[in-house]
Image (cartoon, helix red, strand yellow):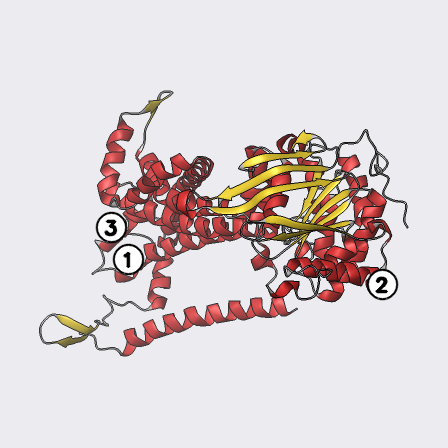
Amino acid sequence: MTDLEKHPTPPASTGGFATPPAIEVRAVERVFGKRRKQVVALAAVDLTVAAGEFVSLIGPSGCGKSTLLRLVADLDTPTAGDVAVFGKPARQARADQDYGIAFQQAGLLPWRTVAANVGLPLELHGASGSERKARVAELLELVGLADFARSRPDQLSGGMQQRVAIARALAERPRLLLMDEPFGALDEITRERMQNELVRICRETGAAVLFVTHSIPEAVFLSDRVVVMSARPGRIVDIVDVPGSSHHRTDDVRDDAGFFHAVATVRGHLHGAPTDAAPGSDTR
Amino acid sequence: MSEILSRSRAVVLGVVGVALLLGAWDLYAAFGPDEGVRAGGETYLLPRADDTTMPHTWDVVRRLGEPVNAVPGAPDVLRAVVDASTFTLAIAARGFVVGVLVGLVLALVMSRFRIAESALLPWIVLSQTVPLIALAPVVRRWGSQIEIAGQQWTNDQSVAVIAAYLAFFPVAVGALRGLKAPDRTHVDLFHAYGVGWWRGLLALRLPSSVPYLLPALRLAAASAVIGTIVAEVSLGLKGGIGRMFIDYTTTATSDPAKSFAPILGAIAVGLVAAAVVGLIGLLLRPYRPAEATR
């Protein structure tokens, strides 16, 4: 473990009574469109993510997992219900820059160097030049791209671009990371390597993560809990606990029996038939 | 290395293309039928090739080096054309700058306020349907009412205004598209950062509008030059290429080579305008990744 990432506040232990949860979603509903063309993207969603916890959202397309993440990020507002981030309304949390965010597209500004992209949020929020420089160097070290500081984004591979995007999301030391299928466009090999990196980064920063994905093994490998969602209307079907702390996963875990069991459970929920149900119960 | 090769290839092809055109001109002027080829009465199938209609390129070039007219001390034609071109270029540049600024401001306002877009865009499109020759006298009449700090409105200012009137249009439309062009991801990201409209404009929307802005500037430069020359003709402004066309064609039958000189001047003005936009494009190179990585 490198010691580069010094977090200002120690990672909150789950269950610490003084720390409000990173995310608290209460009875949230999101309806798109009007009248007859109404689409219920989310209905009656409740979810709590503790500080320092890694939670994945998984489900078929149209189940509202990205919508839920956008509500937490205050990129969209719920039709009904409340979203709180660290005990504050989502809008306030966004204004206070309480979270970092990464999307499926790395979304780097092509006219800026890698270093300038990582420093973008610091620059926009008025950090001084020297402070920015030091922080950017630290972050590039963290994601293993120190040699590419002066490169342009189009000179990097997809995986490297996504690493830059993650470094950028971490720039202001957020205690919460929101990630919307950040590895969705990467090949399988790069993807597993990025997952290992993300585990390390989370361990070093102690940030809570809300992670949207299509991939069951990815969700299970990364998470403390996996939230399984279903579509029409978007809702939470079940929440699967993954054994062991998400901060100590290595490649070995991928071959572990507990890992397979969790994957099977999530898959069962996604397909609408819990694996531990009595035989024949799914033939109704 | 390959870039240098493809560059020099482009230069060679360009030179060959121009040489072929000039060669075709001279060949036809030399061997084409002097009376042209007619079908029946007045319909020409092939143009007349006598020296009055199609002077040889070398005659045109030679004429450049001779005095404009028989008046003692008259400058040679080249000198006169260069002076007129500079005059026209200066007015076109003023019109270009004003037009680009007006276009950018309009695009900014329209991209900021949706209601401004619905209110302004139809008028902006409509503005280009007004014929220039109808517009020119109106601009001059209105201009003559204006007096700023003791300075009387002059005719060349009217011409610059008309150039600007043509130049602002592509910029307004192109910049508006560009300002609305940033990726969804980038827009979300900046929203998440909670930055205001102004910072978002400087850090995101302006840079990402560059690929749309450059072709718009190219069009604007061409429009400014055409607008200047046409307005010079219709307002009768002396000193520029536009008036020179009129003056030199009066002697077309006796001195045909001379009447081609202003055309060369107009081409030169157009090339300079294109080069300026090319330079702007070079300065903005980091902001056009799609083209830069070719």
The amino acid beneath tag 2 is: Asp
Q: Residues within 10 Å of mark 3 (few under 14, many from 20)?
A: some
B274 relative to B144 in the view: left or right: right
Residue B23 horizontal/vertical position (percent): 37, 74
Q: Secondary structure at mark 3?
A: helix
Foreground label between 1 and 2: 2
Q: Nearer the viewer, residue A128 or B283?
A: A128
The amino acid beneath tag 1 is: Ser
Check if mark 1 and mark 2 are on a common chain: no
Residue A233 horizontal/vertical position (percent): 54, 49
Read off the residue under disc 2: A256
Q: Secondary structure at mark 2?
A: loop
A49 relative to B140 in the view: left or right: right
Could one spot residue B133 in this view of the protein? yes
Q: Residues within 10 Å of mark 2 (few under 14, many from 20)?
A: few
A120 relative to B69 in the view: left or right: right
Q: Nearer the viewer, residue B66 or A201?
A: A201
Residue drawn at the location 25% of the way across and 40% of the way down: B135
The chain identifier of the residue carrying mark 3 reads B
Instruction: State which quarter of the image contains the N terminus of chain B.
Output: bottom right
Residue A234 horizontal/vertical position (percent): 57, 49
Quadrant in the picture for residue B163: top left
| First along the sequence among labels 1 and 3 | 3
> How far apart are the two marked residues, 1 and 2, measured between alpha carbons?
89 Å
The amino acid beneath tag 3 is: Ile
Check if mark 1 and mark 3 are on a common chain: yes
Read off the residue under disc 3: B246
Could one spot residue A156 in this view of the protein? no
Read off the residue under disc 1: B259
Q: Nearer the viewer, residue B62 or B85?
A: B85
Q: Residues within 10 Å of mark 1 (few under 14, many from 20)?
A: many
